[in-house]
Image (tube, rainbow, N blue to C red):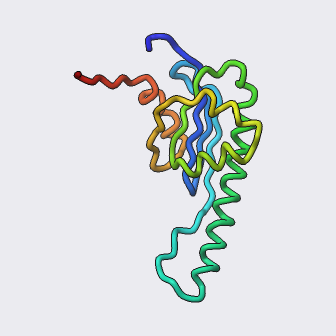
Amino acid sequence: MAADHVVAALLVRLGGYAVGVFDGERLVASKVGSRFVKGRHKKGGSSSGRFSRRRDEQARALIEEAAGVAVRVLEPWRNRVEFVALGGDRTAVDGVLAARPELDWLSERALPRFFTVREPRQAVLERLPYELYSAELSVE
């Protein structure tokens, strides 16, 4: 825990994403982005299918964009990254990882902890090292 590591981060929720690389606690590469994804439509009716299709299209566009950014930001660091921190929404992260075969290596190096992130933004990404290097003590 005292040693510095090179850690990649992929944080994705429907509505935004943040991708970065940390050398120790220093953020050395990053890119964040957002895209509007319509909220769920609770009511039924004749238009509910249209809302659902539109939401699926918006979610698919966000996942494709996030996957492309992840490849561009993380690929130059591939040989140096020791660990990968995944966070946000599991379904969205899984979608990003499945979208591009060039991202397969991220799953192999993923930390067991999945990070809870409400909004993947630059400020959240910059605070991630505090969570990465925090320890959890348990009494047995």
Instruction: Looking at the picture, tell me which residue is in the foreground, 34 or 117.
Output: 117
Q: Residue drawn 65% across and 40% down? A: 31
The part of the image, by quadrant, that contains residue 61 is bottom right
Q: Position of residue 98 (x, y in %)?
A: 69, 46
With respect to residue 4, does 129 lie above or below? below
Q: Residue drawn 64% across and 66% down? A: 56
Q: Position of residue 78 (x, y in %)?
A: 71, 25
Residue sitting at the far bottom = 46
Q: Residue drawn 33% across and 25% down? A: 136
Relative side of 46 to 66, left or right: left
Q: Position of residue 119 (x, y in %)?
A: 49, 49
Q: Residue drawn 51% across and 70% down? A: 40
Relative side of 90 to 98, left or right: left
Residue sitting at the far front = 140
Q: Quadrant of the N terminus?
A: top left
Instruction: Looking at the picture, tell me which residue is in the foreground, 61 or 123.
Output: 61
With respect to residue 53, does 103 lie above or below? above
Relative side of 17 to 75, left or right: left
Q: Quadrant of the C terminus?
A: top left
